[in-house]
Image (spheres, rainbow, N blue to C red):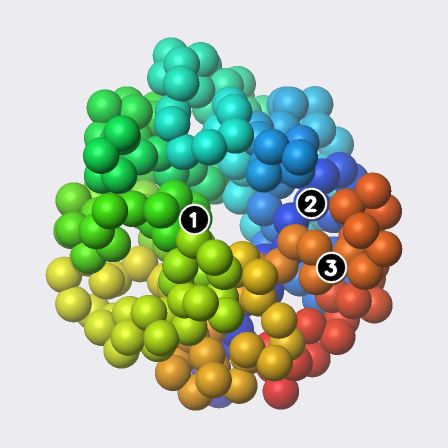
Amino acid sequence: MSKRAVLEVIALDAEDAVAARDGGADRLELVTDMAADGLTPSRETFAAIRARVDLSLRVMLRLADGFAAGDVDELVRRAGELRSEGADEFVLGFLDESGAPDLAAVEPLVDALDGCSWTFHRAIDRAADRDALRKQLADLPGLDTYLTAGAAGGVDEGLPTLIAEAARCGDPGYGPRLLVGGGLRLDHLPELKAAGVDAFHIGGAARPAGWEAPVSASAVAEWRAAVDG
């Protein structure tokens, strides 16, 4: 029996987490402050969510909007706090001014994660050279996923890139799983699934009433059915 595709949902709090789980999510991306496109949640928020759901929780490591790392020491400190609370999966991604991966930020943070699994997020969609970025990050421990829309503008624009990258699975730098998100719609799924993509990430799509409202279990369930269908 083939392994079912992954459905990851953004959760801001325990209420979101429970609704996402009830709708059939496999994994949650934990963030705060979606006005800044998702920042690191507090350890208290992580603990509250961990107490309510038994799902994989990928915790965002990001201090400010944009793709610059900012205070790397603070990022390392926050990662340590979250790990002491039990967090063991993370999301991060930083670029330098030239659009290359900011290894001076990423490497110390990955060292602090000490083997934990992590996703390099949509910073790849702003990279000067996606292929070069993948090769530069290829040997970092724990990197098992790229969250990407294929383009800065979202999946509509990035679909050809996503399909091309899915076909390179197993090439150097293309081992990590492709997790597609960023303007993802239900009507994108057939083409992506046909290309072999088996992991999908939703934020706003899980909240038909907008970001001020909680995750809708029924919206997540509709996605679960479409991802599995």
Q: Residue tagged by mark 3?
A: 206
Local crowd at mark 3 within 10 Å, few (<14), some, or many (≥20)? many
> Quick check: 189 left or right of 91?
right
User: Is residue 106 or residue 36 the one in the foreground?
Assistant: 36
In this figure, which residue is indicated by the disc labeled 1? 122
Side of 81 where 106 appears, left or right? left
> Observer-nearest residue: 98 or 200?
98
Name the mark on residue 11. Answer: 2
**Quick check: 105 above or below 191?**
above
Q: Is residue 143 visible in this depiction of the protein?
A: yes
- Image disc number at residue 59: none
Residue 104, x across and y down, in percent = 23, 24
Q: Looking at the image, is mark 1 or mark 2 earlier in the sequence?
A: 2
Image coordinates for residue 17, horizontal then vertical, percent: 74, 47
Single out the mark in the foreground, 2 or 3.
Answer: 3
With 27 as the anchor, is 49 left or right in this view? right
Task: Tell me: residue 22, above or below residue 140.
Answer: below
Looking at the image, tell me whether mark 1 or mark 3 is earlier in sequence order: 1
Q: Secondary structure at mark 2?
A: strand
